[in-house]
Amino acid sequence: RKEVEQDPGPFNVPEGATVAFNCTYSNSASQSFFWYRQDCRKEPKLLMSVYSSGNEDGRFTAQLNRASQYISLLIRDSKLSDSATYLCVDPPQGGKLIFGQGTELSVKP
Amino acid sequence: EAEVAQSPRYKITEKSQAVAFWCDPISGHATLYWYRQILGQGPELLVQFQDESVVDDSQLPKDRFSAERLKGVDSTLKIQPAELGDSAMYLCASSEEGKSNTEAFFGQGTRLTVV
């Protein structure tokens, strides 16, 4: 089993739609996670952190369910500019980042 | 805004040749990472440095890959000899300290094509 698993998609949604991605992880000791965003052929950039209390930033909401060991990212009112690959990341002790394979989102007009 | 610098941006090399990538992290960042990302997959850690010391190189194919960060600042990743399967994006990242919940900042990467 991979340490961090994501549905690779692609998710094709119309502008204005709400879309949700899930990510499962295997390290039961992990207490926080990151969502990174990666545009085509660019480097990953931090989107938001996720703690057990959840996190909301504008149209983006991230939640962590430690009992079921999954993380979710909800995007409301999707914009064309949201098209990207979203990477779920486990940052265990020691600092290294363990990435999922990424979920591709394509928002269409 | 401070950035992680990488060079070259693109590299085409023939198999069995040697290739090297360079990374200059954000000033003051003690932790430096090299990741490899194959198209359609997430980045995979090759090596992690804390200052000049290797913290984790368990996934580095040591028969052909080497990495160094001699003065604890910039770093070089080398492949010798290159193989077709090494074609990928090589990403360097840095963070202030190697602890959980610390954001890592990525450079633009070096896209390697082995022919």
Image (cartoon, rainbow, N blue to C red):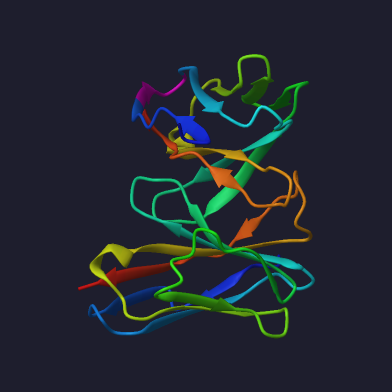
Is residue B87 in view? no
| Residue in the image at 45% along x and 17% along y | A17
**Figure quadrant of residue A46:** top right
Asked if A30 appears above or below B60 in the picture, the reply is: above
Q: Looking at this view, is A36 or A12 the one in front? A: A36
| Residue B58 percent across, percent down from the top left | 54, 59
User: From the image, which quarter does the C terminus of chain B lie in?
Assistant: bottom left
| Residue A48 percent across, percent down from the top left | 67, 37
| Residue A13 percent across, percent down from the top left | 37, 22
| Residue A92 percent across, percent down from the top left | 69, 42
Asked if B75 appears above or below A41 in the picture, the reply is: below
**Figure quadrant of residue B68:** bottom right
Q: Looking at this view, is B7 or B42 the one in front? A: B42
Q: Relative to residue A42, is residue B100 drawn left or right?
A: right
Q: How many marks?
A: 0
| Residue in the image at 78% along x and 61% along y | B96
Q: Main secondary structure of the magenta part?
A: strand
Report the span colored magenta: A12-16
Asked if A50 appears above or below B31 in the picture, the reply is: above
User: From the image, which quarter does the N terminus of chain B lie in?
Assistant: bottom right
| Residue in the image at 49% along x and 39% along y | A100
